[in-house]
Image (cartoon, rainbow, N blue to C red):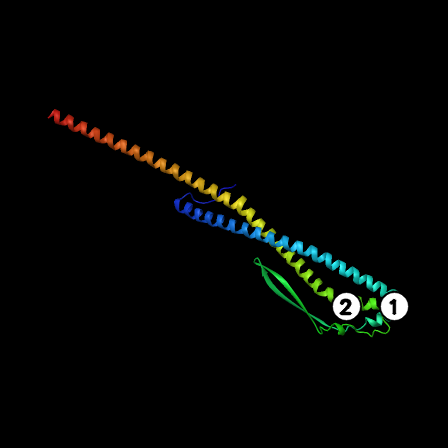
């Protein structure tokens, strides 16, 4: 803790007390925000874990299907079948607010939604495994996009949690104790000055009483001499 360099006056103490009240209120709000962000972050982490396991399994199955297809088809035939894609995909990137954190929102739109129009080749010279793998690629795309969105959101929320944690610690361990210590110091100085002023007033009063008694004695002496 360190004292803030201010003049020990009542006006300054009042200003610091208002600042302390604001800091305490802000500290509570930031702690609540940090706790809510942590809950949201943990939810995203759990969802991310489940979705990643699902996506990895789907991609593993897709790779397995392509391996089987490449085993039963010639490389030239496989390359020709996949050379020209039938569909085009547009990706729209937006934003949404999650606990005062702006996170990305992804949405993709395929040029054609019919399952029968996803194949850019005929079925005569291709294997069924290739058909299944191409259909699986189409199905896994929304999951991949959702996974990317969740992971990016979790990363941004984690960064916001760290920033909020630093602010909470700065208020809790630096600013609030410094304000409390400075207010205590100013109060002690004001009490000390008040005691000094009271002692001086009492001394002045004693001197005035003594002077009055001395004047009274002199008047009594003059009256007696007369």
Q: Residue furthest top?
A: 225
Determine which of the numbered discs, if any, sits on residue 213 in the image: none
Q: Which residue: 88% across, 66% down?
A: 72
As measured in the structure, the alpha-carbon distance from the residue carrying label 2 to the one carrying label 1 is 20 Å
**Which quadrant is the C terminus positioned in?**
top left
- Please tell me in which quadrant of the rendered image residue 159 appears: bottom right
Asked whether, in this view, residue 165 is left or right of residue 176, the answer is right
Query: Looking at this view, is 6 or 157 the one in front?
Result: 157
Residue 220: x and y in percent read 15, 27
Residue mark closest to the camera, 2 vs 1? 2
Determine which of the numbered discs, if any, sits on residue 135 in the image: 2
Q: Secondary structure at mark 2?
A: helix
Determine which of the numbered discs, if any, sits on residue 75 in the image: 1
Residue 34: x and y in percent read 57, 51
Do tag 2 and tag 1 residues touch (Cβ < 8 Å)?
Answer: no
Residue 200: x and y in percent read 32, 34
Query: Looking at this view, is 179 or 3 the one in front?
Result: 179
Q: Is residue 158 visible?
A: no
Rendered position, 189 above or below 116: above
């Amino acid at each position: 803790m360190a004292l803030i360099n201010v003049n020990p006056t009542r006006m300054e103490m009042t200003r610091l007390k208002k600042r302390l009240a604001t800091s305490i209120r802000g500290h509570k709000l930031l702690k609540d925000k940090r706790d809510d962000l942590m809950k949201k972050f943990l939810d995203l982490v759990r969802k991310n874990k489940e979705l990643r396991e699902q996506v990895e399994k789907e991609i593993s199955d897709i790779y397995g299907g392509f391996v089987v297809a490449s085993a039963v088809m010639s490389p030239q035939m496989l390359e020709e079948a996949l050379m020209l894609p039938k569909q085009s995909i547009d990706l729209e990137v937006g934003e949404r607010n999650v606990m005062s954190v702006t996170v990305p929102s992804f949405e993709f739109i395929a040029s054609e939604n019919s399952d029968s129009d996803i194949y850019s080749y005929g079925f005569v010279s291709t294997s069924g495994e290739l058909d299944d793998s191409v259909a699986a690629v189409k199905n896994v795309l929304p999951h991949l996009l959702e996974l990317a969105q969740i992971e990016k959101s979790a990363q941004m929320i984690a960064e916001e949690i760290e920033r909020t944690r630093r602010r909470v610690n700065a208020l809790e361990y630096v600013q609030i104790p410094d304000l409390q210590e400075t207010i205590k110091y100013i109060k002690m100085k004001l009490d000390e000055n008040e005691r000094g002023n009271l002692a001086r007033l009492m001394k002045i009063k004693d001197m005035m009483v003594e002077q009055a008694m001395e004047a009274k004695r002199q008047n009594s002496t003059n009256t007696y001499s007369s």
